[in-house]
Amino acid sequence: MRRILLFGSLVHPSAVRDLPEASEAANRFQLGILRGMLDSGLQSALAITGLPIAAVPRPRKVFVHTSAWSLGEGIDIVAPGFLNLPPVKPVSIHMALRRAGLRTAAGADAVLAYNALPGPGSAGLAVAHELGVPFVCVLADYSARSPRSPLRAAELRWSTRIVRGSDGLVVVSRHAIEDLGVSLPWVKVEGGLSNDWDELPKVEVMPKTIVYAGTPTFAGGARLLLDAFRRIGDPGMRLVFAGRGGLETEILAAASEDPRVQVKGFMPRVEMQRLLASGTVLVNPRLSSERENRFNFPSKILDYLASGRPVVTTLAGDLDAVYRRIAIPLSEETPESLARLLVDLCSRPEGELVEMGARGRDFVLSERRWGSQGRRVYDLVERVIGGRRP
């Protein structure tokens, strides 16, 4: 395979911090796929990006100018300018990305899109059709929420057309295939681990410290964890949130009332790794009751496990059975149950906690590298290319 175009939200890793709406997890997912495919034989990739910037009036930036980056490893990124006004923003991004794709399409064997979103996803599908090459959609953040407005209903219909127009799908949950009722070539790729976890950070473990890293949302279980911590009376316990957005205001208010709660906000990758490796217990409290979690995968759990620390997780979505063995499952998603489990774990000998963490680290280092995950995407794209050949 010579070259692919990826339509999505990928930016240079150094630019994530300057874009409040950018998701580091989404950025790493897209970059991981491309790097894994390059390791598998792909010659080059061009990422065509709809910059993750909120529509006015929040940033009050009506027109977003063109940006471009080169990662120097066979990956180039271009982010065409667009009109940043709702409700024309998705249409403006679609048109800008479509033009950029057609201008730079020479030699492309396939088109990928990160999520079936109006804008990047629809532009990718349009460019693939005009080039006559396969289109593969990566459903990393599929949402099944019922539309609450005519605009959202229109966007959902648009997204459904993108999925049904695909030649293949990459999903993080088999439920997406089942519920969408599509019969396409597909592969499940939960995410991947990069090489920056090969060596553990040299840090001391903080006693009785519970860590949550990622966007603190209700569906992600941030409020469940906060409510559980409120039930723990031990003055020596600490709860650390690292991430921005979501329920950040609510968590800041809790921190102002309880000095045991700390809010780190956005952290550079290296600092986040050090925090994870120093936590007593890391928690993924994503709620099974939230329908959107049926189709998603908590990518932070891979970093959690790679840190070598014990991980508490719910079983929301389509977690493989192996996670029940290498992590500590929270089967009853209540504040009381979570509080009891955290108190119990924080009272155990450090040697026992190290042994728990080592099982998870060994698994993700051997089974969830981006090299092998990207290979699976590469093989799927090769398969759909072969299926279209006369």
Image (cartoon, helix red, strand yellow):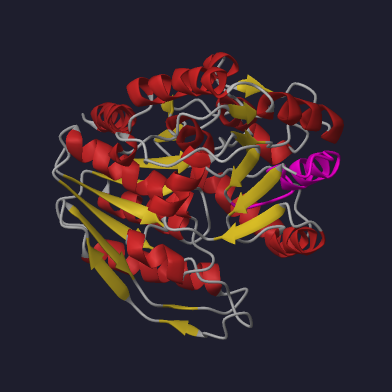
Residue 140 horizontal/vertical position (percent): 51, 41
* Residue numbers of the magenta segment: 215-235
> Please, is residue 168 above or below residue 217 in the view?
above
Is residue 52 in view?
Answer: yes
Query: Along the line of sight, which residue is nearer the eye, 389 or 251?
Result: 251
Q: Quadrant of the N terminus?
A: top left
Residue 276 horizontal/vertical position (percent): 50, 41
Query: Along the line of sight, which residue is nearer the eye, 345 or 2?
Result: 345
Please state if 115 lies on the left or on the right of 81 as rendered: right
Please state if 53 lies on the left or on the right of 66 as rendered: right
User: Which residue is at 44% across, 46% downward?
Assistant: 274
Q: Image quarter for residue 207? A: top right
> Please, is residue 165 above or below residue 319 in the view?
below
User: Which residue is at 69% across, 64% downward?
Assistant: 151
Residue 166 horizontal/vertical position (percent): 43, 40
User: Which residue is at 86% across, 39% downward?
Assistant: 231
Residue 184 horizontal/vertical position (percent): 45, 27
Query: Along the line of sight, which residue is nearer the eye, 59 or 178?
Result: 59
Q: Is residue 269 magenta?
A: no
Q: Image quarter for residue 370? A: top left
> Please, is residue 272 above or below residue 40 in the view?
below
